[in-house]
Image (spheres, coloured by chain):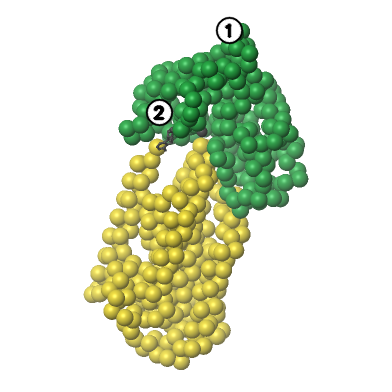
Amino acid sequence: MEMIKVKDLHKNYGAKQVLKGIEFQAKEGEIIGIIGRNGVGKSTFLEILMLLKKYKDGDVQLFGKDIQNLSITDEKVMKKKISAVLQPTQFYKKLRVKELLELFAKYYQCSENVAEVIENFELEEQLKTFFDNLSGGWKQRVSLAIAFLSRPKLVILDEPTTGLDPHMKEVLWDNIRGYSERYQTTVILSTHSMEEVELYCDKVMLIEDGQSVFFDTPQNILATGYENMNQFYLQNTKKGGK
Amino acid sequence: MLMTQLKMDLKMFFRETFYIISIIIPPVSYLLMGQMYGDLTYAGGLSYAQLYTPTFIILISFVTILFSFGFDQVSNRSNGTEKRIQLSPVSSSLLLVSGILKATIITGLGFVFITTLGVFVYDLQVTPVQMFLSFLGLILLDAVMLLLSSAIYSIFKSEKSALGMSIVLFQVVLLTGGFTIPLAVAPKVLQVIGHVNPMNYVNQFYTHIWNGTLAFSGEQLNGWIYLAVLSVLAYAFIIFQGKRKK
Ligand SMILES: Nc1ncnc2c1ncn2[C@@H]1O[C@H](COP(=O)(O)OP(=O)(O)O)[C@@H](O)[C@H]1O
Ligand SMILES: [Mg+2]
């Protein structure tokens, strides 16, 4: 089933054109990576899908519904099915991990899932720590746990593994893949790690100059003669980001 | 859901050492100033306790609201927490109601605490009816302060500039709102600023409510109109700022 359908999406900030024609689709259970230089519009695209940002032209459908001009009730229903990790990841500083889980479980009305998430993400040792006092990797881990807490149909992750040590990355990826398989969750994430794209993503979209210039499986891309995804990336993006 | 939100909101407030210190300072000043000026009689024949009990209750409320409907908002906006909350299916009105309840509870505690001090230290005479009316009045003036604070802080994007603003506001309000020296004996500049400082009127009105001298005529009426107009403007500005985003 098509979860997301994006056609010819345009977005500008004032006079600045950021997205100039994005074409994108995602099916149930797919893990899709979004790549491109810093400042190319990855976060902008993801935040449009999170219903945080408005856009001017184009067509964006989530779960078969146009997201432009949703009614308040429709928006609330949709927000319940979507979850996300933002960049940078932040929550109330002075709440403990356990309290954040409880609070967000209330927001998404899924208090019965808290114990499961604590176990899967192995959060036990930090439950009493204030969010503010967690290390960067742990913040990311807690954010991801909160994102999967409601067993959403769609999870959007903005650079979830940037700056993390390899062990932490592994914990996060095990969970992303585990949840995606178990609940047929669609996962869309931006990343600068071509290794992750190759290892874990079903599909990858490359944004260059505001357009989705490639959208395919890593296997198909590699079959056209690239040694690895890193080579593909370097040959298809201009030098020097912003 | 509201109870959980309120519980968390209160926890967060009482976990900020800086906030705690700021709401302890007014009662301490109330006692210290009383040591020095406790025997004087003030304009209108008011005793120290009659004049400064309501004043210090307003001061606690001002500080509380400045933090929870000002600084906290900017802090959550600048670090991304606000965005994370926005994308979850919780309604903004629920968050607002919880914030208002939080402010009411904390200012209510300030009210009880300072009044109790007044009764035991300065032989303040209070009646239940007067207490009830004063508490209602406090809630009304809380609402005014809340609107003004939200409007002012909706402009700020960074925590640093919001902190600067808080320090300036705090100084101005302390000096020209009748919280330290009575405005009548203050230097001319302060009197002029005090004349447009809404906190000066909030403070005056609360003293009137507290002492049963409230009137909707003459100078008092002008002050009420001034506060009402400012509140409406602040409300309109908040709505406008909310629409402008994205
Ligand atoms: N709120 C905003 N207002 C104005 N410009 C913005 C805003 N958010 C992002 N931009 C600009 O849009 C471009 C794309 O940003 P972003 O989507 O964050 O890129 P990426 O996530 O790929 O690094 C950048 O040039 C950035 O400066
Ligand atoms: Mg980004």
Residue B55 vertical placement versus A239 (above, below): below
Residue A33 picture location, percent across and down: 57, 23
Residue B181's image quarter? bottom left
Q: Secondary structure at mark 1?
A: loop
Check disc 2 and report the residue beneath it: A18
* Amino acid found under the numbered disc labelled 2: Val
Number of labelled discs? 2
Q: Residue furthest front?
A: A239
Question: Quick one: B176 or A194, which is closer to the camera?
Answer: A194
Q: Residue furthest bottom?
A: B39
Residue B174 vertical placement versus B155 (above, below): below
Q: Secondary structure at mark 2?
A: strand
Chain A hue?
Answer: green
Q: Residue furthest top?
A: A224
Question: Quick one: B70 or B209, which is closer to the camera?
Answer: B70
Question: Quick one: A100 or A233, which is closer to the camera?
Answer: A233
Residue B213 vertical placement versus A169 (above, below): below
Q: Is mark 2 within 8 Å of ligand 1?
A: yes
Say which chain tag 2 marks.
A
Q: Disc number at residue A224?
A: 1
The reply to whether residue B124 is in sight is: no
Confirm or deny contact between disc 2 and disc 1 (CB under 8 A): no
> Which chain shows up in yellow?
B
Which residue sits at x=63%, y=45%?
Answer: A100
Say which chain tag 1 marks.
A
* Amino acid found under the numbered disc labelled 1: Thr
